[in-house]
Each structure stands twice: as C-alpha cells, then as structure tokens.
Amino acid sequence: MKVIVKNKEIELEIANNFFKRLKGFMFNKNITYCLRFKTNSIHTFFMKQNIDLVMTDKNNKVLYLIKDLPKNKIVIHKNVYYSYEFPSGFIDNLNIGDILKIKN
C-alpha cells in the first residue's frame, strides 16, 4: 500500500501486530517508508533520526501535525484514530484538515 500526500507517494506499512507496534522505527537509521499505528499516542525513544508525525481520525482527516519530531518525546492527543510516522521532511505541504489518501 501507499500513502499519497499532496501528490507525493510513499510506501505504507501497517503496524498491525505486537512486534511491529513495539519496534516501529526504533534503531532504524534510514527511514524510507511510512508506518501507520491504530493509536492516539506515540513515542520516539531509541530512534536514530527525527520523524514527521500525522495524527488523523478514522477517515484519515489530519487533526495534528508535528514536523521533524526529535527522539525521546511522547505525543498524546484525544480523538485520534491513526498515527502516521513519516521520514522527516515528507509532509512539508500538508495542513490540518487535509485528507491522507491510501492506495492499494
């Protein structure tokens, strides 16, 4: 699957089991894809590089954006259904209220 953000595509991997949710991007030195978690909170402990974070509702409407989120942080927001982790710099043109498009 892929995520489309303002005409840019990136590979999407869904963190849908315990190990994928636990590991996320921890210890990853070269992030080249997007991870989707079904959660309203994430952490960046043990990460090697910054990420862009997009938090959406069930319909992938963007509720919160954090660009260039550094390591060792915790982010929690109410009313969030999905959290997407992108490589830093990928969501530069994305705005709150935009819809993330998912393509199979």
Image (cartoon, helix red, strand yellow):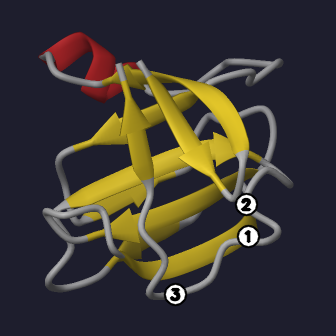
Left or right: 69 as drawn, with respect to 36: right
The residue pinned by badge 3 equals 96
For the residues bearing labels 1 and 3, Cβ distance under 8 angstroms: no
Q: Residue at x 18, y 85 (%)?
A: 78
The residue pinned by badge 2 equals 91
Is residue 47 something one can see in this rendering? yes
Query: Percent x, y for residue 12?
Result: 47, 25
For the residues bearing labels 2 and 3, Cβ distance under 8 angstroms: no
Q: Secondary structure at mark 3?
A: loop
Is residue 72 something one can see in this rendering? no
Q: Residue at x 81, y 39 (%)?
A: 49
Q: Secondary structure at mark 1?
A: strand
Q: Measure the alpha-carbon separation of dots 1 and 3.
A: 12 Å
**Front-most of 52 and 2?**
2
Query: Percent x, y for residue 53?
Result: 56, 60
Q: Measure the alpha-carbon separation of dots 1 and 2.
A: 7 Å
User: Nearer the N terminus, badge 2 or badge 3?
Assistant: 2
For the residues bearing labels 1 and 2, Cβ distance under 8 angstroms: yes
Q: Measure the alpha-carbon separation of dots 2 and 3.
A: 11 Å
Kind of residue at badge 2 = Ile
On residue 67, the disc is 1
Disc 1 packing (10 Å; few <14; some 14–19; many ≥20):
some
The vertical placement of 37 against 42, above or below, is above
Q: Secondary structure at mark 2?
A: loop
Kind of residue at badge 3 = Ile
User: Nearer the N terminus, badge 1 or badge 2?
Assistant: 1
Q: Residue at x 22, y 66 (%)?
A: 40
Disc 2 packing (10 Å; few <14; some 14–19; many ≥20):
many
Disc 3 packing (10 Å; few <14; some 14–19; many ≥20):
few
